[in-house]
Amino acid sequence: MKRKNDFNLTGGMIICLYLLIAVSTVAAAEEIRERSTGMASKTGWSVFTRGGYVYQMDTDIDNGGSFSVNRFFVQGGPTYVSDGGTSISLAVGYGFDGYDFSGDTGFGSLRPWEDIHSLRFSIPLRWKINEQWTGFVSPTLRFTGEKGADFDDTLTGGGFAGFSYRFSDRLTIGPGVGVLTQLEDSTRVIPILIINWKITDTLSLNTGRGIGATLGPGLTLDWRPSRAWSFSIGGRYESLRFRLDEDGTVSNGIGDDRSFPLFGGIEYSFTPMVRISVLGGVEVGGKLRLEDENGHKIIEENHDPAGFLGIAFSTRF
């Protein structure tokens, strides 16, 4: 029987999606960071894009097998900033995670999933309450599934909201919360914290996006000795959860990949609006989990630390 609404990115869909991505946006926390580095526009319209590629090297899975991953992501979009400091964006993003499992025993022998596609849409809104306080809200819609999964079953949604307080020109901190539905119809609550601390004229500590992915919260220490060069180290928590193909190892099941990447990166700015970076690091505390369609655990295994290398870019015009 032919499935309806399969999660297959055919040639035509890829082209349409890429055109959408070429005009997508930056999230609220990242906008604060960009303003501090001069990358964000002061008022009016701007267009943001960023993306990259990361290769996670082959690593062993406890109790048998190994795996590696090719990860690609791109996102961006239009942003409007008013004279009063209010900004609104239309965010569109696409991610691809290509898994390669191997081995004759354990988790690797199951070949539980292969190519995972993610589509993300959100509308980040920031508004200036007064000279110190800023509010933000970002409703979001996500589709995350293996190629061939029923598109309707890959949908999750929710949003993020919170406030930030500007203590000085050098320090902005703010709490927030995210409420997101899950693939198995449960709800997940995620506390978040925005930090943008310019420790010295060249050293800063901030949260926001990751240098190589956008799957979880983290913290980055950045040293910028010149306008062109920046060196950073950081860590974050990442979680990728997705619906599986109905013809796979577990029909319509759920896959889960979690880890704590620790990374270092070098960024070069051709102009304040065009940047490219290379990065490398290691994922620790990694865990793979296979569930049935209702979210009940079938098998869960830890994996060894996994090295990774990548390249990323960002632009704003």
Image (tube, helix red, strand yellow):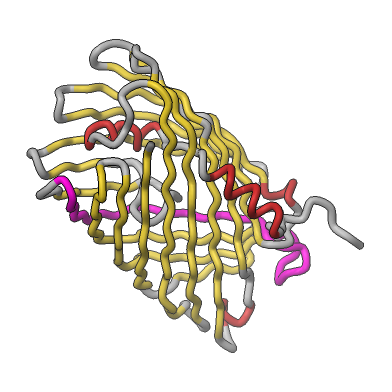
Q: Quadrant of the C terminus?
A: top left
Q: Is residue 240 above or below residue 59?
A: above
12 left or right of 134 in image = right
Q: Quadrant of residue 115?
A: bottom right
Q: Quadrant of residue 112?
A: bottom right
Magenta stretch in the rendered image: 227-252
Q: Residue at x 29, y 17 (%)?
A: 133
Does the magenta-highlighted stretch encompass residue 228?
yes
Q: Is residue 292 visible?
A: no
Q: Residue at x 24, y 61 (%)?
A: 264
Q: Residue at x 20, y 49 (%)?
A: 221
Residue 175: percent from left, percent from top = 33, 29
Q: Is residue 32 above or below residue 223?
A: above
Counting every numbered tag in the picture gives: 0
119 left or right of 170 in image = right
Residue 173: percent from left, percent from top = 25, 29
Q: Is residue 254 above or below residue 131?
A: below
